[in-house]
Image (spheres, rainbow, N blue to C red):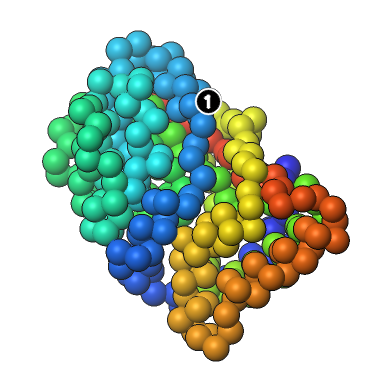
Amino acid sequence: MAILHFKHLTHLMSNIVDKTKMYVDMEQSKAYSESRPRYTDKLFKTIADYCKETNPDLDLAVDVGCGPGMSTIGFTKYFKKVIGVDVSETQIACAPKNIPNCEFKVGYSDKLPFIESGSADLFCCGASFHWMPQEETFAEADRILRPGGSIAIFDHVVPSSDIPEVQACFEKYWKKLFPFYPKEATHAIDGFHDLKMPYPGWIRNDEITLSMKYTVQQYVDFMKSTWVCRAYRDAYPDDDILTNLARELTEVLAKSEAGSEYTVTWPVFILMAHKPNH
């Protein structure tokens, strides 16, 4: 499973990262909204079809830790109403404003007073659950979900390349960046294989991947959107890590004869559970 390409670096992660500083400024949030990969419809349909197993009429989906909405807007095709929630005001400010059945709110995964108890068909977290208090978040999910409602935890993690020289370059730079990841992110890098969902009979889906053709600049823009790259640049202002990355990737691509574009793949995993009807 490609998600494990970077598992050997998780021991570098830190216990002292101040998560309150993550994605709070507008520059970082704009980079996130512009440069992160978009989930394909296959992911949203997979989750919606799972929800329909116990609730055929999909009224409300609540996406917590939604960022600027990449994990949110795809559900608007399947649910009558979708609410995205994030702790970052700047992330919410970057979310789209023109989707009639979708709204975004600043809030916390374990405190959703603006969601009525027993009203949601889906409680989901995309690329964010590892930052949340798990027990309290699951308790709030149970409160807002109607009987037969569903929880979905999904994520894509560190991208990889099938060109060995490019992958080696990725690993060189991610090794510099991993010490700026909070230890909690270990769970996501590992694909949440140690996570137990709160309801019986839950399932796991590892069948979806995101694959995109990237230029060197597009990959640099993606890296710029990550918290760890921002933290590294703050800690080492004299090390122009993005310029160095661009130069080395360009050299590697020239030597590999891969051309100016290469495929980047993000493995996706989904954990899904139905709240019992009784």
Residue at 47% in and 52% down: 35
- Residue 185, image x, y percentages: 52, 60
In the rendered picture of this protein, how many numbered marks are placed on residues? 1
- Residue 199, image x, y percentages: 43, 31
Tell me the SS state at disc 1. Answer: helix
State the residue in front, 115 or 199. Answer: 115
Q: Is residue 172 left or right of residue 75?
A: right
- Residue 209, image x, y percentages: 62, 36
Residue at 79% in and 63% down: 252
Question: Callout 1: few (<14), some (14-19), or many (20+) C-alpha neighbours within 10 Å?
Answer: few
Inspect the image, locate mark 1, and give the three-letter code of the amino acid beneath it: Lys
State the residue in front, 225 or 247. Answer: 247
Quadrant the N terminus occupies? top right
Q: Which residue is mark 1?
A: 42
Residue 98 in view in this figure? yes
Q: Is residue 260 left or right of residue 240?
A: right
178 up-or-down from 59: above or below: below
Residue at 57% in and 54% down: 218
- Residue 247, image x, y percentages: 69, 70
Residue 11 position by quadrant: bottom right
Residue 15 in view in this figure? no
94 up-or-down from 79: above or below: below
Quadrant the C terminus occupies? top left
Q: Residue furthest bottom?
A: 238
Residue at 71% in and 52% down: 260
